[in-house]
Image (cartoon, helix red, strand yellow):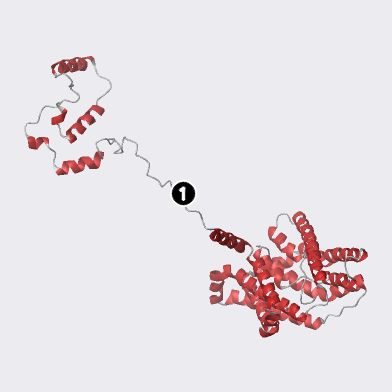
Amino acid sequence: GFKEFQPPLRRHQNKLKIRQLPTMTSNNDKNNTDNDESEMPFGLSVHNHESPPKHESEDLPSNEEKRNTTKSYGTIDDDPETGESSQQESPPETDSTPAPPVPLYQRIWQQWCKFYNKNSFLVLVVCAILIAYAYPPLGAEYLRPDITATWIAVLFIFVLAGMGIKTEEFAKAFQRLYFNVFLQVFNFGVVSGIVYGFSRFMVYVNALAQSLADGMTICASLPITVNMVLVLTKSAGGDEASAIFNAAFGNLVGVFLSPALILGYLGVKGEINLGDVFVKLGLRVILPIAVGQFLQKFVSPATEFVKKYKKYFKTAQEYSLVFIIYTVFCKTFKNGSDASVGDVFLMIALQFLILGFVMVLAWFSLRMLFRKEPTLQAMGLFGCTHKTVAMG
């Protein structure tokens, strides 16, 4: 009955006094406590007893005391030492209803976006071929591929390469004699030898026409491609300087080596205009690389441009290469071919088979010979197996 007349805050303070009592007491204190408790009414003890207030105004705390007490201890059940609640808070209510299922078209679109981000170049090449097949005159005539694809797109690719590659990297590429020799020997010798032996076997078993077998051997004797090896090397994070050096060097050597290989395999003389090859390589590869290096070294706005937009160089070069491929297929579909549909699909299957085999062989050879140089491995995978379209 005594607690009913105490304000809630006073009861709370009494509880605090109980918590702060020492656990160990002396015999004298114990005797005094027993005497005090004997004088208390039944149901009360000294621990929660206080003398009745003299005045009602003194018993009620002021608003300032309430605010201080609430700020210090929180609610009545809060811990006085930490101010935290002694009762465990109830977990927040969660909505147990399941999320609505994602529509099928959204899931298909998300999967397509992931696939495109990983294989954008392949998707663009396939689209370019299909568009070229749908209307060949657009890329073969109206877009003037002899200017836009042959010169503008190629110059754009190599100017960006010259601006993005440091001069020291070119110096290192020239000094990698062992790697450069391995790549050129594999590209000219190993690939052409494998293709020649495979094509002779296909002719022997009457699975391939003689003209198609000779065409495979001639294309296998060509030098490394110029544009695609650079773009794919950059996309794979390979050594761009080595790609440019081997592309230029391989095409220069191919002027003499490709006709010799064709003559040795087939007994057919192939003529290549030496001056034309040198002029095209000089104007399309060496000159734009030199211009890009000059801009990088001596033109400060160009340097800032490279720092700001270098991450977009790869995408721009890929788009340029896709445009070149588009115009090449437009010319192919417009001019037509004497081969039947069955021969075309047979050649596609054989090219996949041969290219896959030589790429696997090149990859394991590069992994064994250049274990600690992954950038050279990436570049060598393309450089050992690619063949130029223009010279072919």
Secondary structure beneath label 1: loop
Quarter of the image containing the C terminus? bottom right
* Residue 324 at least partly seen: no
Relative vertical location of residue 113 with respect to residue 100 in this rendering, above or below: below
Q: In this view, does 96 lie to the left or right of 174?
A: left
Q: Considering depth in this image, is 194 or 295 the residue closer to the camera?
A: 194
Q: Where is residue 106 in the image (x, y as percent from the top left)?
A: 54, 60
Q: Where is residue 4 in the image (x, y as percent from the top left)?
A: 15, 30
Q: Where is residue 85 in the image (x, y as percent from the top left)?
A: 30, 37
Q: Considering depth in this image, is 315 or 131 the residue closer to the camera?
A: 131
In the rendered image, which quarter is residue 214 located in? bottom right
Residue at image coords 56%, 76%: 302
In the rendered image, which quarter is residue 386 located in? bottom right
Q: In this view, does 283 lie to the left or right of 345?
A: left
> Tag 1: residue type?
Pro
Residue at image coords 87%, 75%: 259
Q: Where is residue 16 in the image (x, y as percent from the top left)?
A: 23, 31
Residue at image coords 47%, 51%: 99
In the rendered image, the residue lying farthest to the left is 55
Relative vertical location of residue 90 with respect to residue 175 in this rendering, above or below: above
Residue at image coords 63%, 69%: 166
Quarter of the image containing the N terminus? top left
Residue at the disc numbered 1: 98
* Residue 337 at least partly seen: yes
Relative vertical location of residue 50 with respect to residue 84 in this rendering, above or below: above
